[in-house]
Image (spheres, grey):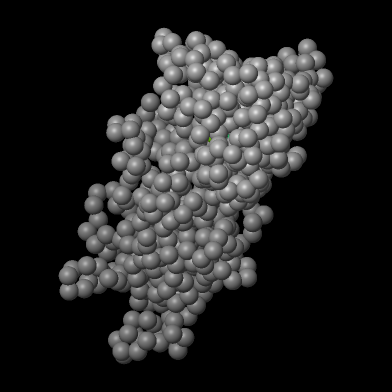
Amino acid sequence: MISAGDFIADVVRADNAAGTYSQRVQTRFPPEPNGYLHIGHAKAITADFGIAKQFGGICNLRFDDTNPDTEEVEYVESIIDDIAWLGFTPAQVLYASDYFEALYQWAESLIERGLAYVDDQDQEAISAQRGGYGKPGVESPYRNRTVEENLDLFRRMRAGQFADGAKTLRAKIDMQSDNMQMRDPVMYRIRRGHHHRTGDAWVIYPMYDWAHGQSDALEGVTHSMCTLEFVSNRTLYDWYLSHLDLPYEKPQQLEFARLELTYTVTSKRKLKQLVDDGVVDGWDDPRMPTLQGVRRRGYPAAAIRNFCTHIGINKTNSRHAIEELESFVRAELNRVAQRRMAVVRPLKLVIDNWPTEDGRTIAEARQAGEDAPAVTQWFEIPNNPENPEDGTRLVPFSGQLWIEAEDFAEVPPPKFFRLSPGKEVRLRGAFLVTATEAVKDGDGKVVEVRATYDPASKGGNAPDGRKVKSTMHWVSADHGCDAEVRLYERMFTNDAPGSTTGDPLDDLNPASMEVLAAKVEPALAPVEGGVAPGQVVQFERIGYFAADPRTPMLFHRTVGLKDDWASLQKRS
Ligand code: ATP
Ligand code: MG
């Protein structure tokens, strides 16, 4: 049994035993509001909130909003909404931008202690001087300015006296450090950009490293979790904090592996490109791995939480099979989703000996060239055999039905046990029927199947106990409703998108969506007692489908019924 946060939980236990934080545990989830959250973030959220909960601590949501160019209120709102949907409640919602003044004062304190200086060089020159691994760094010609000069210049940077990019504030650490992050990192840049919260109040903005640890420290965070790519930033995180007067004990950064899934990407930048290029229909396109996307597609929040808990918090980056996540989705839906009948590729089935309301049969009425109304019978069908408490519903049955086109074969291939001329099958919960004839159009395409039913088989079983091999779903043509059904395939054709060319977009699957005109039972209509926006149901024998949250009679396939994860594991 793997449990979330194992190695991090060990650190917390050790800190508690040593009294490092006086038994306090405080974490934060720190997204930059520059896009929508994706499934990878769900892992971080589960870890951040999970550790806090496990140790009776608190977890805040803190927006790392230090870049005015890429951040928007729309993203802030969607992130708040997504976290609530996932089932977590932040103790507080905080913003790094609320600390701009505190960060500024701390920066002045570093200048006063000779630990930061104003550099007049541009970003390009600074990068060139940084050197590289085994390549010495070159000290800036501005590195040894006096404290007075640095303070004066920094104040004038804040006051807007210099052009964008004309100067930076840099920490004075070590231009020969083996860790590139320590080679006099930039703390502030000049940038006139309208910030979504501070407006035009600031023209200097702090860099990530000069905001993150400081925000943690100001809030009283104890354990600051992030992903592995920040390992080399930890030294800088610690350096900054060790040179400041902190209101609480010094927080510590702990890194865990990112969550990556096969056949999809978890990078806000790449996902934004898909939206901007119109490859998908917005951030909540059901093919997107965003939380808004998987939610619209019908993934239950509980399934995502269970998956994240199951994979745990580890220290090696790896790509998890999307099939594994889907198996959690299926397990949850199998428990909670009601069963309904929908025919996604409809073919008409006419039951010749079915009674009409005027006492004839459909065949007799047809022979007379009349379209006499057929008798309707209502069948009580369980909503979820896995959960009797979900009760039953009445489903109308009549002499003209829709069946799945692939459930009929005029000339059945070997081992085809569904409907074909002369073959008897069960129509789920209703009657046994035998096909008699395939009616074709001029092109030889089957457009209608004629059949007879056994009136003694009401409920689906013959009194003589004779066996049929197939049970098929159906929708009464007289009562069914039209619906649009969208089937989804993987968004990328490569299990590691971009692994061959470097650009995931080269591996886009051009056939990731199929749109079908389906016929569905009346209980799927968006009327009272029908299907609710966003509700997920199982279309019997077809898969799980989510009713679109906005458009009535539009259904998205969440997952199919087959457990691909089980078969993948058997193969390996
Ligand atoms: P992206 O590259 O998609 O923009 P990011 O790391 O820049 O992601 P942030 O908004 O900065 O996104 O992330 C907020 C938190 O979520 C960070 O602590 C980050 O480490 C974590 N996180 C981001 N992506 C993943 C992922 N794929 N798996 C686990 N945690 C992640
Ligand atoms: Mg980031």
Residue at 37% x, 60% y: name it. 515
Residue 125 position within the rendered picture, expressed as x and y whole percent measured from the top left:
43, 25
The quadrant in which residue 71 appears is: top right
Residue 403 position within the rendered picture, expressed as x and y whole percent measured from the top left:
38, 65
Farthest-out residue, right: 22
Residue 422 visible in the current orientation: yes
Above/below status of 543 relative to 310: below
Q: Quadrant of the C terminus?
A: top left
Question: Looking at this view, is 388 or 186 the one in front?
Answer: 186
Residue at 36% x, 50% y: name it. 512
Above/below status of 17 relative to 336: above
The quadrant in which residue 497 appears is: top left
Q: Quadrant of the N terminus?
A: top right
Above/below status of 271 relative to 378: above
Residue 325 position within the rendered picture, expressed as x and y whole percent measured from the top left:
50, 38
Residue at 48% x, 75% y: name it. 479
The quadrant in which residue 111 appears is: top right
